[in-house]
Amino acid sequence: MNTHKIIIAIDGYSSSGKSTLAKDIAAKLGYKYIDTGAMYRAVTLFAKQTGIINEKGEIDEEKLKAILPQIDLNFKNINGKNHIFLNGKDVENEIRSLEISELTSHVSKLPFVREFLVAKQREIGKEKGIVMDGRDIGSVVFPDAEVKFFVTASPEVRAKRRYEELKSKGIEVDYNSVLKSLVERDKQDTTRETSPLIKTEDAIVIDNSNLSREQQLELALKYINERIKNIDNAKN
Ligand code: DC
């Protein structure tokens, strides 16, 4: 039996399937799942609602900095699904629009926003027994995480997933704009100055272009169980 509670950090590109993997692992181990992308998206939604960011992505940084302490973020389980609440309101669906996806890459570049959210993420992970997904979890938030995965898949496979996801929610999009937006976001995620998406040396790469959901979970669990066994053995 697994006795030692650990931190599992999952980083990767947009729509790489990292959230699905993170949720599946959390469900299997009885761990808490935290989607840090949802936190950056919720801050962006707040900035949009308050007029601090315009549709071109231009941000009044001073105003945003001043207003950050007014942002309260919480995760709640609604019918078995993790929803993010912004100042008491469920914004899980609202934060997934293409517009918020695009604006979020401007907000997530700002060092003071990252500092604010990283502090919250570390607080949430304090007690371990957590699976956290994002871009900088293994590199910045929890550099000492016991298990780190770097999840990837080809841009075309990822764009198709995002397209299907948006379509299933009744959001009108065409595949080519989804692909274009995704490639643009990859570029911003990997080249931004603050906490760019990188694969740390100790991260295990999972390329799921040709893996089913079950196969990727099985692969990840093999690594996790091995790691927990080693930690338990070292303790005894
Ligand atoms: O994983 P996602 O697509 O929901 O992330 C939304 C945006 O937030 C994306 O532009 C990357 C950014 N992000 C980040 O900079 N750091 C994180 N830990 C998580 C997400």
Image (cartoon, rainbow, N blue to C red):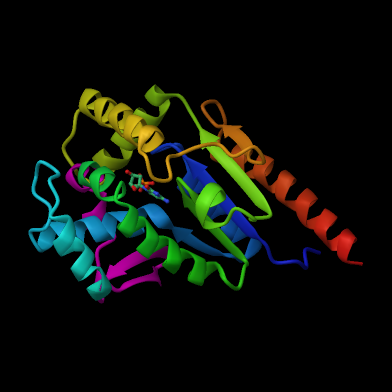
Q: Which residue is pictured at 19% across the width and 69% down the height?
A: 67
Q: Nearer the viewer, residue 46 or 119?
A: 119
Q: Which residue is pictured at 54% across the width and 31% down the height?
A: 208
Say which quarter of the image contains residue 76.
Answer: bottom left
Q: Is residue 80 visible?
A: no
In the rendered view, does 121 fall on the left or right side of 49? right
Give above or below for 28 relative to 177. Answer: below
Q: Nearer the viewer, residue 51 or 170?
A: 51
Position in image of residue 96 (x %, y %): 26, 50
Q: Quadrant of the N terminus?
A: bottom right
In the rendered view, does 40 fall on the left or right side of 134? left
Q: Is residue 197 visible?
A: yes
Is 80 contained in the magenta span? yes
Q: Quadrant of the C terminus?
A: bottom right
Q: Which residue is pictured at 58% across the width and 63% down the height?
A: 130
Position in image of residue 120 (x %, y %): 42, 68
Say which quarter of the image contains residue 125.
Answer: bottom right
Position in image of residue 34 (x %, y %): 47, 61
Highlighted range, magenta: 72-101
Give above or below for 78 relative to 210. Answer: below
